[in-house]
Amino acid sequence: MRGIVDRYEEGFCIIEVEGHTREVPVVQVEDGVVPGDVVEWEEGHWVKLPEQTRARQEEIAKLMNDLWED
């Protein structure tokens, strides 16, 4: 299962999974995960997927550039 980290608040990490948000205890999230990261559920905790995160960031940057070029 994959998701995107939305934010942290009051001991929870808010992760969007399939269009719905989940409140996950921060102890179940790998250290170093920040909002915007793509994460995957592996062996009882959420881990960052660096390649997917980078691809997502590049796609967002491209969309923003395309928007401002017009």
Image (spheres, rainbow, N blue to C red):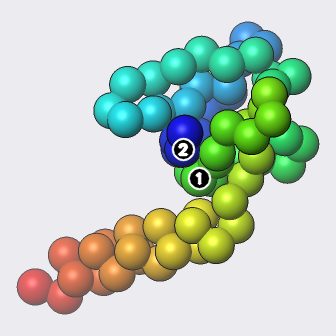
- Does residue 61 sit above or below 5 in this rendering? below
- Does residue 28 sit above or below 4 in this rendering? above
* Residue 51 visible from this viewpoint: yes
Residue in view at x 62 percent, y 53 percent: 37
Asked if the residue at tag 2 contacts the one at tag 1, i.e. Cβ–Cβ closer than 8 Å, the answer is yes
Q: Going by the image, does 3 lie left or right of 47?
A: left
Name which residue type carries label 1: Val
Residue in view at x 57 percent, y 67 percent: 52
SS of the residue under disc 2: strand
Q: Nearer the viewer, mark 1 or mark 2?
A: 2
Task: Give the residue at the far front of this rendering.
Answer: 43
Task: Give the residue at the far bottom of this rendering.
Answer: 69
Q: Going by the image, does 55 lie left or right of 62?
A: right
Q: Going by the image, does 9 lie left or right of 57?
A: right
> Which numbered disc, 1 or 2, marks the residue that appears first in the sequence?
2
Residue named by callout 1? 38
Task: Give the residue at the far left of this rendering.
Answer: 70
SS of the residue under disc 1: strand
C-alpha separation, residue under disc 1 versus residue under disc 2: 7 Å
Name which residue type carries label 2: Arg
Of 63 and 46, the residue lying toward us:
46
* Crowd rating for badge 1 (residues with CA inside 10 Å; few <14, some 14–19, many 20+): many
Residue named by callout 2? 2
User: Residue 24, how many percent across, how many down?
Assistant: 67, 19
User: Which of the 4 quarters of the picture holds residue 61?
Assistant: bottom left
User: Which of the 4 quarters of the picture holds residue 21?
Assistant: top left
Residue in view at x 81 percent, y 35 percent: 43
Which quadrant, please, contains the N terminus? top right
